[in-house]
Amino acid sequence: MKTFVAVVETESFTGAGVRLDMSKALVSKYVGILEDHLGTRLLNRTTRRLSLTESGVAYYERCLQILADVDEAEQIAAQSAAMPRGTLKVAMPVSFGTARIAPLLTEYMRRYPEVKLDIALADRRVDLIEDGYDLAIRVGNLPESGLIARKLATDRIVLCASPAYVKAHGAPRVPEDLKQHACLNYSYSSNGDEWFFGTEKKQSSVRIDGPMRANNGDMLRLAALDGAGVIWQPHFIVADDLRAGRLVKLMKNHPGVEIGIYAIYPSRKHLSAKVRTFVDYLVACMA
């Protein structure tokens, strides 16, 4: 795998040989053995250049992750005695941070007294590198960014409104009905003004409109509690209100889509003990 990756990144067998301190013939032999093992061609070879086949592209991307995992495993083994210490800067969404992360922090600090937590609550997506964060917690779909994402949990979007709103305006039965309702939208949604329902295999969506949008889910929840309209929010935001009957779930035959909750950090390579222990701790707590 390392030889194949080196060929792709140097765009030649000769360059890979120089990087890995081996002969061009041995590099070619290794790639040939790999292709024979997989039963598919990974590289298109001409006298002038090399290019990846479709299978090669997919295999290259997986090789990068696997080799990074191997490096990380070796690093963890080598640094198992290292004690997490220093300031850990973490960015996370306001609602999820206060509702789900905050109750876990005291125990982490008890376990790792030499780590000082610096928590920033903001629903906007920060630039980890530019803004100097060690990691971030993100909710929802992840755009391609080159960052490492480790899944903490899965949640589901819930469509709901107050009983008073439903009594006054009726309950939507299918997504298209939402065009006739006051929809309260989340400003930072990656879907814009489109709300999705169903599963990965069968989804439907509708473009909504309404009297209000806000960049915080709890603001929308409070507006919905006051009868202002319908909201489409993660279950962790509305769970208590649903249990208490202050909000009611709508369109039960059209469930909201599942969303992931992730810890995001810049690189697996040389991952600091403070980041590794914090992410491992969150994974264990949310398992």
Image (tube, rainbow, N blue to C red):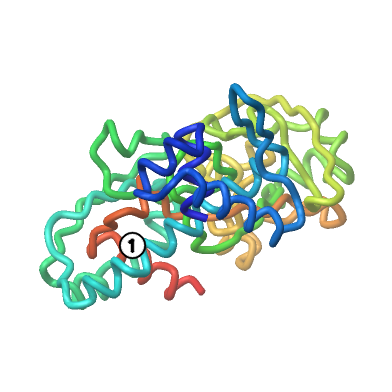
Q: What is the x, y in percent for residue 18?
A: 36, 41
* Res 43 quadrant in image: top right
Q: How many marks?
A: 1
Give amino acid for label 1: Ala
* Res 255 quadrant in image: bottom right
Observer-nearest residue: 121 or 28? Answer: 28
Mark 1 highlights which residue?
102
Examine the rendering and report whether any part of residue 93 can be seen: yes
Q: Is residue 159 above or below residue 186?
A: below
**Would residue 96 appear left or right of 243 to someone viewing this image?**
left
Residue at 23% x, 38% y is: 132
Furthest residue toward top: 48
Q: How many residues crowd around disc 1 within 10 Å: few (fewer than 14), some, or many (20 or more)?
A: few
Q: What is the x, y in percent for residue 99?
A: 42, 60
**Would residue 189 appear left or right of 283 to someone viewing this image?**
right
**Would residue 259 appear left or right of 55 to someone viewing this image?**
left
Q: Is residue 223 above or below residue 37?
A: above
Observer-nearest residue: 24 or 201? Answer: 24
Residue at 58% x, 34% y is: 189
Q: What is the x, y in percent for residue 141?
A: 59, 44
Examine the rendering and report whether any part of residue 277 can be seen: no
Q: Is residue 202 above or below residue 132?
A: below
Q: Is residue 275 above or below residue 183?
A: below
Residue at 19% x, 76% y is: 110
